[in-house]
Amino acid sequence: MSRPVSDRALLVLLAALTALGPVATNLYLPALPAVRDHFSASVAEVQTTFSISLVTFALGMLLWGPWSDRYGRRPAVLGGLAILMAGAAVSFVAQNLGWLVTGRGIQAFGTATGIIVARAIVSDRYPAQRMVKVLATLTMVSVLGHALAPAVGGYLTAGFGWRSVFAALVLATACLALAVWLYLPESSVRTGAPPRAVEMLATAGRLLRMPLFVGCVAQTAIIFSTFLVFISLAPYVMVSALGRPSTEYGMYFVLIAAGYFLGNWSVSRFMGRREPQRVVAAGVILQSVGTLAALGFVALGLFHPLWIFLPMSLVSFGQGLALPNVTATAVSLAPQQAGVASSAVGFLQQIFGALCVQGMGIFPTDTPFPMLIFCAAICIVGVVILRVVPPAETGQPLDTK
């Protein structure tokens, strides 16, 4: 049994769980060039340590939600944290790139429990309209970790080597696991029955036949692929194309985190005054404008990092506006099986992101053009999808009986 905890303290704990996956990723990103040098590998080979984590994270998002529906939120979170620490330990002692890929994969599977179960807990406790604001608030609290992690990872790598990133992750996860054990209440009613894959697949199939759900998945996939491709290739671009030390990546990443924070703050502050579809439309259009601006500046020969990161902060602001709305809409379409809906959204967006990250690994990083052309093109696709399926309009919940 957990100890009594205030609603505000619970939100902070949920924010930490929500941030777990992104922080683990962002902590590692500045180490990518060092890992490449240590193992004398190509960019595409080292990108595998990132893309495999997206795949296993996606599998975790697919499985942890339904598992938590059946057995409870607390066991799911504690189990995921234990797996995360095991994966980070394997990565810490890895003697070749294959073992590092394995450790990163195990680690990411464990981190998936945080965001999936946190969303499910929010769904357990709040109605759909309130859920949008709570999701935005969680992200605002956790975005501090997003912003600090690349800087911390950069200085850890520069001062103690890339393995120190995984040692820090084990320590931080152990502290979070203790807080979960002491303070996270159980919010679901456990049935004790084993997960029934047929039921889960049937629910996911019905959701995927709903245009509104497909529209939400498409927009989240575009948002994540834009973000993941940029953050995974930018460390290489900083070193190879811009001639900057890897530690500077963390400094400029603060602009990306600040943009996303402001986008989420705007949602939590003004959501009641604006229709969700207008907020999503504004976010999708802004991310397109930002990526096109960054590409245009580079095309004009402006190669200082600010000419890339400032417009990309506008992109992240737009994503902060759109993502809480489309995520809440998708999850609310299956109120009786929120874990399944949350898992389906997370799985599909991560798999698409992994394919994009690995595919972009074959392009040169001694120029920012491939990275920015991809980001601009995929965001324009988002605008087109917005015209076909407005993803934030009110939808009819799925009947799961």
Image (cartoon, helix red, strand yellow):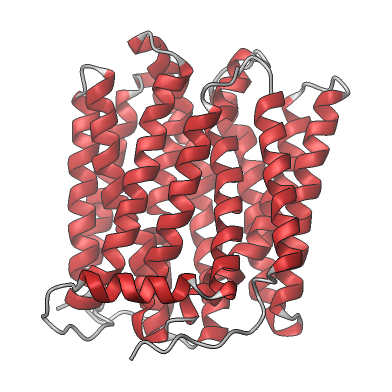
In this orientation, which residue lies closer to the viewer: 374 or 323?
Answer: 374
Q: Is residue 121 above or below residue 309?
A: below
Give the percent coordinates (x, y) of residue 258.
Answer: 65, 50
- Outermost residue on the top side: it is 40
Determine if residue 323 is in view: yes
Q: In the image as oriented, which residue stretches furthest toward the right?
A: 300
Which quarter of the rendered picture does the C terminus lie within?
bottom left
Viewer-proximal residue among 37 and 341:
341
> In what quadrant of the picture does the N terminus appear?
bottom left
Figure quadrant of residue 236: top right
**Which residue sits at x=40%, y=64%?**
344
Q: How many marks?
A: 0
Residue 42 against residue 340 in the figure, above or below = above
Residue drawn at x 33%, y 75% is 202
Q: Position of residue 302 (x, y in %)?
A: 83, 23
Give the side of residue 346 with respect to residue 311, left or right: left
Up/down of 181 relative to 299, above or below:
below
Q: Quadrant of residue 161?
A: top left
Q: In this view, does 158 lie to the left or right of 202?
A: right
- Residue at the spot x=18%, y=83% of the render? 190
> In the depicted view, which residue is nearer to us: 72 or 373?
373
Residue 383: percent from left, percent from top:
75, 57
Left of 246 or right of it: where is 314? Answer: right
Q: Left of 215 or right of it: where is 8?
A: left
Q: State the image coordinates of residue 274 (x, y, percent, origin top left).
A: 76, 80
Give the residue at x 42% y 37%.
27
